[in-house]
Image: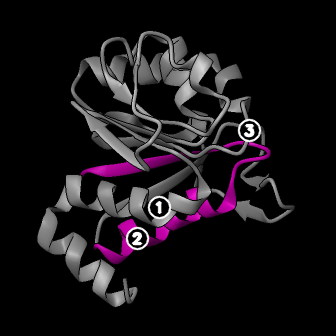
């Protein structure tokens, strides 16, 4: 079964990560949270501690359909193994998603060159080579999805659900959320 992996690091934005986990699981999709820290316990930006399903070193990403990066911090940009995974996965056609500050990781890797992208205000300078679409809450360009920030976490998550499971499933989950 294809799996979505959502990466957690100290200071991640709770609503961005957990809205994606929640919406994708409501859509019946397999989702695993992955800590890039030395512990499965990861403390988010507002002092909520979450237990990830896996440590990065424990994960086998061969079944990945989507790799998702929540924002809230720039720390994900410090993990070279994650960046290598993003590059090889992108080349293999895996969908890559990043919201808030996290698109900076993709920009630094050159994955946004010539692609439309959005991000949290003031992070535009890190979207190297991107065609800025920061007036949009969620942007899809090829197999990359970017989101603006926490206010758009549900829209971002529903977009991911639609990409993987289709519009009917997105609409079903949205209706269950009273959206």
Could you give the CA–CA distance between mark 3 and mark 2, rounded to whole angstroms?
A: 22 Å
Q: Are marks 2 and 1 in contact (CB under 8 Å)?
A: yes
The label on residue 88 is none
The label on residue 20 is 1
Q: Are marks 3 and 2 in contact (CB under 8 Å)?
A: no
Q: Secondary structure at mark 3?
A: loop
Is 30 placed above or below 98 here? Answer: below
Assign the N terminus to one quadrant of the image: bottom left
Residue at which label 3 appears: 73
Q: Are marks 3 and 1 in contact (CB under 8 Å)?
A: no
Magenta stretch encompasses residue 21: yes
* Residue located farthest toward the right when viewing the structure as drawn: 47
Taking the image as drawn, is residue 46 in sight? yes
Task: Count numbered badges in the picture.
Answer: 3
Q: Residue at the spot x=57%, y=57% of the render?
A: 16
Q: Residue at the spot x=50%, y=59% of the render?
A: 152
Location of residue 124 by image quarter:
top right
Residue at which label 2 appears: 23
Q: Which residues are magenta?
A: 1-27
User: Residue 57: percent from the left, percent from the top?
Assistant: 59, 33
């Amino acid at each position: 079964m294809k799996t979505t992996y959502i990466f957690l690091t100290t200071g991640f934005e709770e609503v961005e990560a957990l809205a994606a986990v929640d919406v994708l699981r409501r859509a019946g999709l397999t989702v695993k949270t992955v800590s890039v820290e030395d512990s499965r316990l990861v403390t988010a930006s507002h002092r909520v501690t979450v237990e990830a399903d896996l440590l990065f070193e424990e994960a086998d990403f061969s079944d990945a359909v989507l790799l998702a990066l929540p924002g809230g911090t720039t720390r994900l940009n410090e993990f070279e193994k994650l960046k290598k995974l993003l590059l090889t996965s992108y080349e293999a056609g895996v969908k890559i998603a990043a919201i808030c500050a996290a698109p900076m990781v993709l920009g630094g890797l050159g994955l946004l060159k010539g692609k439309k992208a959005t991000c949290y205000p003031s992070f535009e300078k890190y979207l190297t080579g991107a065609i800025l679409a920061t007036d949009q809450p969620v942007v899809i360009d090829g197999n990359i999805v970017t989101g603006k920030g926490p206010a758009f976490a549900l829209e971002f998550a529903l977009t991911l659900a639609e990409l993987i499971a289709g519009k009917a499933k997105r609409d079903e989950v949205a209706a269950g959320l009273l959206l």
